[in-house]
Amino acid sequence: MGIGSASLVSAVFALWWDLGNVHSFHNADDLVPVMASLWHWTPFYWGEDRFGMTLALLASPFKDPLTNLLIQNWLAAFFGFLGLALLPVCVSGMAAIPAGLLGAAIFIMFAPGPALYAWFGTGQCYGAAMGFGAAGLALLNAPEKPGKIRMVFCAILIFLSIWTNSAMPLVLLPLTAWNAWKSAEEGKPASRHLSVAIFVFASFTLVWLGMRSSGYMRPYSIISPMRWAASWITLTGTMWDGLLRGGMATALAAALMAGLLAFKVSPSAVKSLKDGLALLFTGAVYCAVIALIGWVADRAGDPRYTLPVLALFVSSAALSASALAWFRKTSSIGLVFLLVVLATVRQAGPPSPGGIRPALDRSMGAATPDIIRLGATHVAGDYSRVWPAVFHANMVLYKSGTARTIWALAYRGAPTRYLWKKGDPRTWKIAVLHGDNGLTPFSPEMRGARLFARTPAITVFQPAVR
């Protein structure tokens, strides 16, 4: 098996995932990249500076909101799966692809639902960034000497990885150092690994400059040394409680035990175990460093910051398990594929193209008929409720052929203000979902507004025109 085979498996999984039940669980974070792709693309997530909008850029030719969502969702699932499949290849070469597929099966089968939707979804950067980065390193880790075209392609992938998630150097550099050490130990030149390190530093510099000019630069200073231990403990505990407890911990322990048994029986298992330790060490480095960043330390109760660590730990365990002599038999490939299929069925259900629209209607379309019927031009209020309502209403309008846009007056909506401010305020009708109290901070247009209509789902106001 090679990278082409891994990409094909990733593409099939992504299609299955995209046609499964994931569309019942979208939230505002998932939908902002879709609206950014449709309305006003920016290099980084609206209101942020460390999450690059690579997938939104790739999907920007698709102007149908539903199609755009499906394309971005497929891309996120494709690169998320590809990252899991190729992480072992980054340290062990092409022969480790079956181990990567085993790791992907373990991740899909046992990771908690929120972690899965974050890794394979559009609302977080971690899965896509790992896919770009792992593909870049895997291509350079091929047995033959890489030519200029491959080096350029790898440089592009590394840049996309760091642009998508600016913390990816914490993964790419330790793995590159490990490969350089292995090359030196085998008497091989380490020039390609030096090139990778240069690509990483150059890409991070470009991304950092872009972050600083985004207008949303977050405070990424290192916390006081007095807080280091507490932050490490908190983030580790968060990872255990949110990602590792239960079935995941059992699966990882079983995989590691299989590797240790192989080591006990066969000295040839040493290579797989060492490479597995490299992935484990990389995950520890990532966790230890991000825990020291003030932005993360102040939010250490959120397990999403450790999602790349989980991916590295799973890949480490799978690579260790691949040390079993049985794993090198042809029959093992069929079993690994079966595990991937079973894991996908368990988490995504059977593919159901006809179920996508009804799932979106149920999860976010309750207010759409009233929003459209009353001629609302904006939906104002709480971030978590506004973006699903706005996405769904615009999706319905597009499908009906109506040349009309409904805008969001909510957190992260500032980049679109210049678009709808061109309109005549006398024609605005601002819908507020019932039970929503998040108006004041984000909607100065609501001040002095008069009641226009009220339904069981929404209240519509017209702004005061001075």
Image (cartoon, rainbow, N blue to C red):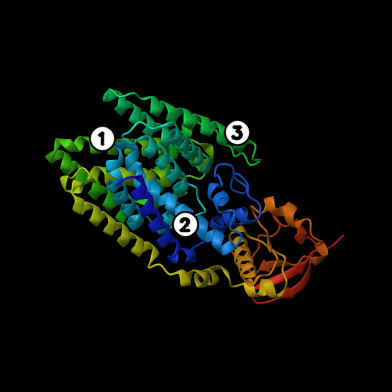
Q: Name the kind of residue labelled 3 in the image.
A: Leu
Up/down of 187 relative to 36, above or below: above
Residue in view at x 59 percent, y 55 percent = 61
Whichever of labels 1 and 3 marks the residue nearer the N terminus, that label is 3
| Residue sitting at the far bottom | 456
Of badges 1 and 2, nearer the viewer stands 2
SS assignment at label 3: helix
**Label 1: which residue?**
274
Q: Secondary structure at mark 1?
A: helix
Counting from the top left corner in percent of width and height, residue 316 is at 30, 42
Q: Residues within 10 Å of mark 2 (few under 14, many from 20)?
A: many
Displayed quadrant of residue 207: top right
Q: Earlier in the sequence, mark 1 or mark 2?
A: 2
* Disc 2 target residue: 74
Task: Estimate how packed mark 3 is, as few (under 14), some (14 to 19) or many (20 or more) residues with alpha carbons within 10 Å.
Answer: few
What is the C-alpha distance between the residues marked 1 and 2?
34 Å
| Quadrant holding the C terminus | bottom right
Of residue 277 and residue 142, the one placed in the foreground of this image is 142
Gap in Å between the C-alphas at discs 1 and 3?
37 Å
Where disc 2 sits, the SS reads helix
Determine which quarter of the picture holds residue 312. Answer: top left
Q: Position of residue 443 (x, y in %)?
A: 72, 57
The amino acid pointed to by label 2 is: Trp
Residue at point 14%, 39% (across, down): 264
Is mark 2 in CB contact (under 8 Å) with mark 3?
no
Mark 3 or mark 2, which is nearer the start of the sequence?
2
User: Which residue has dot 3 on it?
Assistant: 209
| Residue 129 on image: x %, y % | 47, 44
Mark 1 is on which residue type?
Lys
Can residue 289 be seen in this snapshot?
no
